[in-house]
Image (spheres, coloured by chain):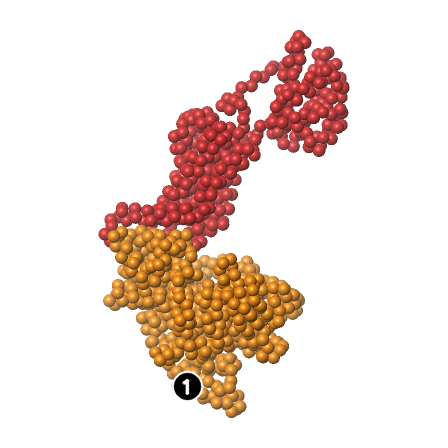
Chain colours: A orange, B red
């Protein structure tokens, strides 16, 4: 079974965009093994989706040869399409059809014999845990359920090759786990070959083989373990007693020998640059001032992880500079409570979206609001920002209710909306100009801030490009910059990293950390569980209620068992959800 | 796979049809377009637009009242076309005209009775508000009509032989009562069918693009032809349903006679409906966006059908260039067919020549649609 199911030789694909030409696939050649799970990884714009679409014949290569199951997909797309299963990023479920009607439609379209259907339906519905919901409209399912139904629809005919384009984006951790169980079972039982693209590196790590793409080029292909070995001997964990991990991380990341520094648990994880002779770095070299101050610096070599290798590979490519962010002046002492929420409740008709939640946030803290889609995070968030009236309870931000606060009071607040509310027809510069003048900045002060934003967020190259044509990572940067134009003391960030690739996410958190170091209070929502590690304090929400609150370590301790001595944030989340609620499939 | 080629194709087509049926049933908007819109539009046009002159407000300025002026005034009073008001001087009447209280003035000078009795010509003067030239012509015609019949009556009563110019006797064919509603309703049906046909399909393909279902459909063995058939068949049925509602309303509510054959009408309607649906499909395939598709469908089908089909505005009085454009408007042919079938009967030359034009359009559109709809995202 070592024959290739997918072969590319010198494939090229170019798209014409308004302002420039994009080489989505640049002279790419490789093969995907039969009967294996292969993961496509890479930052946004690497060409992952284009590759998938070429493989199923809905895009045509400009040149080169692309064979799927031995068939030239450029010449015989229909023949390929009748043997593969493909799940696009937004799977084509008909929301006004029930679960059963969706299954029937795809069974008809894929010509599954009528007498064989029922057994397959039963099997799939059982696997996805959706048997009780076959009569429900697909539009009324939760995000995770929709995704599972999408997968079920592509699997009705048991395709020889399954193509999955970011199947778990926006899916809660529990459904994500179930989704992969189904996929891996198909591979084992039916010998199905799978090609998937993902932004979650833990998913990539579980694949039999990974293919790393960057800007349309193949960077490497191989076993994930082999991939991780590339940074062997370069990964360390650093802990310093009585020192905040955030300032530690900042110091370390400015060190030229350090390629990447990441907050992890109570310490900082380091990936060192490649050297001829790799050895454990000395504390004096890494943190000279801490050693001088007689602090105990503990440096320990750790086994490399997939993510370390991924970041190391791409950072080499992108010749990274250290990120810098200019000082923001914040008054007040570190122990002030800047956000206070008491018995906050919001009802929409009979439905209680947020049910009596309580928490407070201190100055300079990064406070995380976590939960699956529909948990009530965004509703709570909007009430905090004064965008939505409360049904009952109290909200105070910097001592005031933002719904009735004056414009000058609002100047203390910065807000970054979930969908990056930028004017897509305005250029980067025009957007910045607009947002800064909305906060009353004029003339030189305004020009200074715009220059600052362009430099800090490395947007100079794109300053005259329309915001709508920016790559996703840059949109996020611009949106973040727009929220910071007036130097706010409190920042509200709603799903700032949704749909953004791992590299851009890291950059984003580095900037956020730097802001928190300066005393800016940050309230952030996310559904990436690993990002919870960056928070000082967090609450996990589910069905409008707070399931648990505490520091990241507290959360992980909850899920710590003998069988699971080192749980991840995601393990903690799944533990909490399964412990405290009964899933019923609805939103 | 155990299924053979034809039954595999039928299975896919049936799957699409079933899906569209569920979507139509669950989405009230297409039902509303098909069954509510024709009723609303028919009533709006049936009652709101009328080209008949009735109760035209007209001023009669009488400078010196006597028996004769009284008799003429009575004639206007009795006519169903006029609602006269009386003035004692031309100045008062002119003021009323300026204020748009009246649309025209019949001016009887102080020497009216004298001149008339002396047998002199043109003793009355008519002033018409010409802002709406069409209306002005109609008003003028009716005033002359009243004047002449009064004159005839007057002379007969007195036994005087008046030297009148040739007296016209009008006879109108097919719509003998000259009721513009009878003439308008078939045209309105044509406009409604244009709009419904293209709106129904304009939304459906664009919706698949917008909701991301198109990408998933493409990666199934479903061919583009099967997809298009799956879209056309259900909306054709829906469109014909609304056609029947419109015809029923026309005949039983508005009392428009159906002089031609019902089945011929069904046939030409089916042909026209296919043309409209294909226009909608073409818009939908090209725009890939429901909002744009909806707007384009209205701009590209409803407006030209309304303005250039000849149902409201006479094509022969348009500039030559615009007349040329009307040949590209399918509704033009359908309006001619429907008006003929309703008011005249099975006039084969009219029906067949227009059907031929529609058939040519159908073939061209079918070619365009199938060449534009390829299984690719580009």
Looking at the image, can residue A487 be seen?
A: no
Taking the spot 48% from the left edge, 28% from the top edge, the residue there is B256
Residue A130 placement (x, y as % from top left): 35, 60
Q: Is residue B189 left or right of residue B140?
A: left
Query: Does B104 sit above or below residue B329?
Result: above
Residue A476 placement (x, y as % from top left): 51, 66
Query: Does B126 sit above or below residue B271?
Result: above
Q: Quadrant of residue A212?
A: bottom left
As drawn, which residue projects farthest toward the top? B159
In the image, A218 versus A193, the foreground residue is A193
Query: Does A64 sit above or below residue A204?
Result: above
Looking at the image, can residue A468 be seen?
A: yes
Q: Secondary structure at mark 1?
A: strand
Residue A518 placement (x, y as % from top left): 57, 77
Q: Quadrant of the C terminus of chain B?
A: bottom left
Q: Quadrant of residue B148?
A: top right
Mark 1 lies on residue:
A300
Q: Mark 1: few, some, or many residues within 10 Å (few <14, many ≥20)?
A: some
Q: Quadrant of residue A63?
A: bottom left
In the image, B77 versus A34, the foreground residue is B77
Q: Is residue A499 left or right of residue B217?
A: right
Taking the spot 35% from the left edge, 59% from the top edge, the residue there is A132
Chain holding disc 1: A
Residue B231 placement (x, y as % from top left): 39, 45
Taking the spot 46% from the left edge, 77% from the top edge, the residue there is A552
Taking the spot 51% from the left edge, 38% from the top edge, the residue there is B40
Q: Is residue B364 left or right of residue B255?
A: left
How many tags in the picture?
1
In the image, A231 versus B284, the foreground residue is B284
């Amino acid at each position: 079974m070592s024959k290739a199911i997918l072969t590319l030789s010198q494939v090229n694909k170019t798209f014409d965009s308004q302002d420039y030409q994009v080489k989505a696939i640049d002279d790419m050649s490789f093969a995907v093994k039969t009967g294996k799970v292969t993961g496509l990884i890479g930052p946004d714009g690497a060409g992952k989706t284009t590759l998938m679409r070429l493989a199923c014949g809905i895009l045509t290569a400009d040149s080169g040869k692309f064979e799927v199951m031995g068939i030239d997909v450029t010449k015989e797309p229909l023949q390929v399409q009748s043997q593969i299963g493909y799940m696009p990023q937004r799977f084509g479920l008909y929301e006004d059809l029930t679960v059963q009607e969706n299954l029937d439609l795809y069974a008809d379209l894929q010509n599954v014999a009528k007498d064989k259907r029922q057994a397959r339906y039963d099997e799939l519905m059982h696997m996805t845990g959706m048997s009780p919901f076959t009569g429900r409209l697909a539009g009324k399912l939760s995000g995770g359920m929709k995704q599972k139904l999408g997968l079920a629809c592509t699997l009705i005919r048991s395709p020889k090759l399954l193509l999955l384009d970011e199947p778990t984006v926006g899916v809660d951790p529990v459904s994500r786990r179930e989704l992969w169980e189904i996929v891996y079972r198909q591979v084992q039982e039916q010998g199905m070959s799978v090609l998937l693209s993902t932004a979650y590196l833990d998913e990539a790590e579980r694949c039999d083989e990974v293919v790393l793409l960057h800007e349309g080029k193949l960077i490497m292909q191989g076993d994930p373990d082999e991939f991780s070995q590339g940074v062997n001997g370069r990964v360390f964990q650093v802990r310093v007693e009585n020192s905040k991990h955030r300032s530690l991380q900042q110091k370390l990341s400015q060190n030229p020998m350090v390629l990447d520094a990441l907050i992890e648990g109570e310490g900082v994880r380091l990936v060192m640059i490649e050297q001829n002779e790799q050895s454990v770095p000395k504390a004096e070299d890494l943190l000279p001032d801490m050693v001088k101050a007689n602090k105990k610096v503990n440096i320990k070599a750790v086994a490399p992880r997939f993510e370390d290798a991924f970041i190391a590979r791409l950072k080499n490519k992108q010749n990274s500079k250290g990120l810098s962010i200019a000082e923001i002046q914040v008054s007040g002492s570190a122990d002030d409570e800047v956000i206070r929420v008491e018995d906050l409740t919001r009802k929409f008709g009979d439905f209680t979206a947020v049910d009596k939640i309580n928490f407070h946030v201190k100055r300079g803290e990064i406070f995380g609001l976590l939960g699956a889609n529909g948990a009530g995070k965004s509703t709570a968030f909007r009430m905090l920002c004064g965008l939505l009236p409360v049904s009952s309870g109290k909200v105070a931000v910097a001592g005031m209710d933002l719904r009735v606060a004056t414009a000058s009071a609002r100047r203390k607040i910065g807000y970054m909306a979930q969908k990056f509310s930028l004017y897509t027809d305005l250029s980067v510069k025009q957007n910045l100009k607009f947002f800064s003048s909305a906060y009353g900045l004029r003339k030189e002060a305004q020009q200074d801030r715009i220059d600052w934003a362009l430099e800090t967020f490395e947007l100079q190259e794109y300053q005259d490009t329309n915001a709508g044509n920016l790559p996703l990572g840059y949109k996020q940067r611009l949106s973040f910059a727009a929220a910071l134009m007036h130097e706010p003391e409190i920042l509200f960030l709603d799903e700032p990293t949704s749909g953004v690739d791992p590299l851009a996410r890291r950059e984003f958190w580095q900037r956020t950390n730097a802001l928190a170091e300066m005393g800016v209070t940050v309230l952030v929502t996310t559904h990436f569980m690993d990002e919870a590690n960056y928070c000082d304090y967090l609450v996990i929400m589910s069905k409008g209620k707070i399931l648990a609150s505490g520091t990241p370590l507290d959360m992980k301790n909850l899920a710590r068992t003998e069988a699971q001595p080192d749980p991840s944030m995601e393990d903690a989340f799944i533990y909490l959800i399964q412990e405290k609620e009964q899933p019923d499939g609805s939103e | 796979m155990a299924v053979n080629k034809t039954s595999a194709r039928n299975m896919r087509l049936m799957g699409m049809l079933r899906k569209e049926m569920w979507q139509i049933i669950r989405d009230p908007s297409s039902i509303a377009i098909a069954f509510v819109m024709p009723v609303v539009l028919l009533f709006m046009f049936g009652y709101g637009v009328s080209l008949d002159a009735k109760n035209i407000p007209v001023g009669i300025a009488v400078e010196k009242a006597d028996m004769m002026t009284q008799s003429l005034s009575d004639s206007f009073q009795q006519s169903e076309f006029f609602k006269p008001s009386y003035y004692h001087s031309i100045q008062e009447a002119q003021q009323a005209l300026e204020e748009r209280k009246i649309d025209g003035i019949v001016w009887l000078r102080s020497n009216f009775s004298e001149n008339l009795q002396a047998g002199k010509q043109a003793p009355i003067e008519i002033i018409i508000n010409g802002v709406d030239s069409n209306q002005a012509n109609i008003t003028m015609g009716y005033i002359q009509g009243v004047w002449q019949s009064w004159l005839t009556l007057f002379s007969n009563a007195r036994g005087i032989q008046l030297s009148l110019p040739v007296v016209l006797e009008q006879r109108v064919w097919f719509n003998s009562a000259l009721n513009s509603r009878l003439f308008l309703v078939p045209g309105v049906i044509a406009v409604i069918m244009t709009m419904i046909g293209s709106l129904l399909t304009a939304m459906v393909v664009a919706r698949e693009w917008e909701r991301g279902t198109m990408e998933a459909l493409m990666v199934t063995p479903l061919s583009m032809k099967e997809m298009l058939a799956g879209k056309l068949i259900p909306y054709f049925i829906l469109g014909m349903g609304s056609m029947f509602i419109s015809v029923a309303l026309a005949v039983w509510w508005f009392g428009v006679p159906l002089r031609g054959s019902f089945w011929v009408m069904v046939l030409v309607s089916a042909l026209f409906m296919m043309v409209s649906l294909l226009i909608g499909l073409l818009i939908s395939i090209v725009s890939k966006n429901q909002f744009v598709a909806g707007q384009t469908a209205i701009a590209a089908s409803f407006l030209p059908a309304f303005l250039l089909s000849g149902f409201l505005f006479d094509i022969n009085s348009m500039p030559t260039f615009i007349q040329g454009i009307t040949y590209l408007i399918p509704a033009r042919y359908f309006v001619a067919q429907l008006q003929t079938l309703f008011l005249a009967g099975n006039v084969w030359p009219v029906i067949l020549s227009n059907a031929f034009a529609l058939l040519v359009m159908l073939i061209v559109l079918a070619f365009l649609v199938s060449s534009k709809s390829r299984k690719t995202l580009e």
